[in-house]
């Protein structure tokens, strides 16, 4: 952790980093609301609903997410997540994952949705927060000497790795598994784990991803993104979605075709309001609009890491840094899939894509990062008060305790030589 008073610029203080994170989040949410309305209106009409239905649902989820984010920011001190509250959230996440595997709803070929009365949610979006927070807690206990290395490994294995593998196995969700893995790696990095161990774990994760992709038929089929026109159906088979994404990106040019004027959203580009909404952003707002979105997520990364560095304890540092890393990694994972750098993963663009669980979970994570920022600001006040007290009570260098002890030692040595 670094001293925030030694930093300069907007992100050099907890308040500056907090304001930057708030502005960036607000900008992404507003852009998402506009783009969901633009991209989702046609899809809503094709479903027999009103053009505003996607907008209304997105706005409602956004309000719920903002309320949840403000509660975890302003009402719950982040240190409270080291007690029973964390265990309760972790237990609820595990229960939802189990219920999803038993009675979950299948959508787009995967059983990842849970319907509880009128509420439909994707538990994995909330499980990733609980699992990473539990990892942070266990690392904090280890760093503080409250847990031995053996106990730490056992707890992380039982409380984090087994639920993570359960999520991957039951929901076949490699994307969420990768996002959580990145969050855990961020915890290790911020927790000052030796680079050698981080490199070893990264290597193991790469091997796991390769096996997961090429060991499963439908995932290996997605590698067609490398040559989508050679999908065996002249680009109308498994390569269709990425080809249509390329078309929307190309139509946008530098300045776009204008807000609301996308052609890709007219059932031309599948999932245009969710996984591939970035293509609609670029088509309507141009490459400049896409660069703005990318820039906002880069700014979020800098703001979140600044808050992490300014935290008054290692728990806050690891918490803010890992949650920020997960949000930004998911954003660039989605964008990479849309522009053809990576195969499709089915992960939404945080704050922008249509999807209630993703939006609420992302806003909760921002609230947790802001809570760490609040703690850092409070710590600064106390540090300044203590510094003022030290200035008042400071003694001249000539009379410092070290100098006085040195003088007494010299005096005793002189008396001893005199007696001899």
Image (spheres, rainbow, N blue to C red):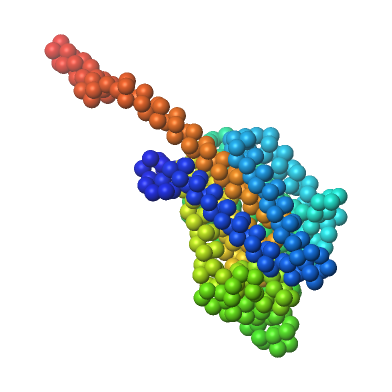
Q: Position of residue 30 (x, y in %)?
A: 61, 57
Q: Position of residue 151 (x, y in %)?
A: 63, 40
**Quadrant hosting residue 367:** top right
Q: In this orientation, which residue lies closer to the viewer: 30 or 366?
A: 30
In the picture, measured across the screen, residue 53 lies left or right of residue 134, that is right
Q: Position of residue 215 (x, y in %)?
A: 71, 71
Q: Quadrant of the C terminus?
A: top left
In the rendered view, tell whether residue 209 sits above or below residue 201: below
**Quadrant hosting residue 80:** top right
Q: In this orientation, which residue lies closer to the viewer: 389 or 259?
A: 259
Q: In this orientation, which residue lies closer to the viewer: 201 or 251?
A: 251
Which residue is located at x 50 percent, y 45 percent? 18
Which residue is located at x 74 percent, y 47 percent? 93
Q: Position of residue 347 (x, y in %)?
A: 67, 63
Q: Is residue 347 in view? A: no
In the picture, measured across the screen, residue 325 lies left or right of residue 262, that is left
In the rendered view, tell whether residue 209 sits above or below residue 391: below
Which residue is located at x 79 percent, y 57 percent? 113
Q: Quadrant of the N terminus?
A: top left
């Amino acid at each position: 952790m670094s001293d925030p008073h030694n930093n300069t610029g907007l992100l050099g203080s907890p308040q500056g980093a907090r304001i930057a994170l708030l502005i960036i989040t607000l900008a992404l949410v507003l852009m998402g609301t506009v783009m969901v309305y633009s991209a989702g209106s046609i899809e809503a009409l094709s479903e027999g609903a009103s053009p505003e239905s996607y907008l209304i649902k997105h706005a409602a989820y956004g309000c719920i997410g903002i309320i949840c984010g403000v509660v975890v920011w302003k009402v719950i001190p982040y240190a409270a997540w080291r007690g029973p509250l964390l265990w309760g959230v972790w237990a609820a996440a595990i229960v939802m994952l189990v219920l999803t595997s038993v009675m979950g709803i299948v959508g787009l070929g995967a059983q990842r949705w849970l319907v509880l009365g009128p509420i439909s949610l994707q538990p994995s979006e909330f499980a990733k927060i609980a699992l990473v927070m539990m990892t942070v807690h266990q690392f904090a206990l280890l760093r503080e000497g409250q847990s031995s290395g053996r106990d730490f490994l056992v707890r992380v294995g039982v409380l984090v790795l087994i639920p993570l593998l359960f999520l991957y196995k039951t929901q076949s969700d490699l994307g969420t598994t990768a996002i959580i893995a990145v969050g855990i790696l961020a915890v290790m990095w911020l927790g000052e784990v030796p680079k050698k161990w981080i490199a070893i774990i990264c290597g193991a994760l790469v091997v796991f991803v390769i096996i997961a992709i090429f060991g499963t038929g439908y995932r290996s089929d997605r590698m067609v993104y490398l040559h989508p026109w050679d999908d065996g159906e002249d680009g109308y088979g498994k390569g269709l979605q990425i080809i249509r994404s390329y078309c929307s990106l190309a139509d946008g040019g530098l300045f776009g075709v204008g807000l609301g004027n996308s052609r890709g959203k007219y059932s031309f580009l599948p999932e245009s309001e969710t996984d591939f909404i970035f293509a609609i952003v670029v088509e309507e707002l141009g490459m400049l609009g896409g660069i703005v979105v990318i820039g906002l997520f880069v700014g979020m990364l800098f703001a979140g890491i600044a808050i992490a560095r300014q935290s008054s304890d290692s728990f806050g540092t690891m918490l803010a840094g890992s949650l920020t890393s997960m949000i930004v990694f998911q954003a660039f994972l989605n964008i990479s899939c849309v522009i053809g750098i990576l195969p499709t993963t089915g992960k939404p663009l945080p704050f922008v894509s249509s999807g209630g669980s993703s939006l609420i979970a992302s806003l909760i994570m921002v609230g947790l990062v802001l809570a760490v920022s609040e703690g850092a600001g409070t710590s600064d006040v106390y540090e300044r008060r203590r510094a003022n007290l030290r200035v008042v009570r400071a003694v001249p260098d000539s009379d410092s305790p070290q100098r006085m002890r040195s003088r007494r030692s010299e005096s005793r040595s002189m008396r001893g030589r005199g007696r001899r």
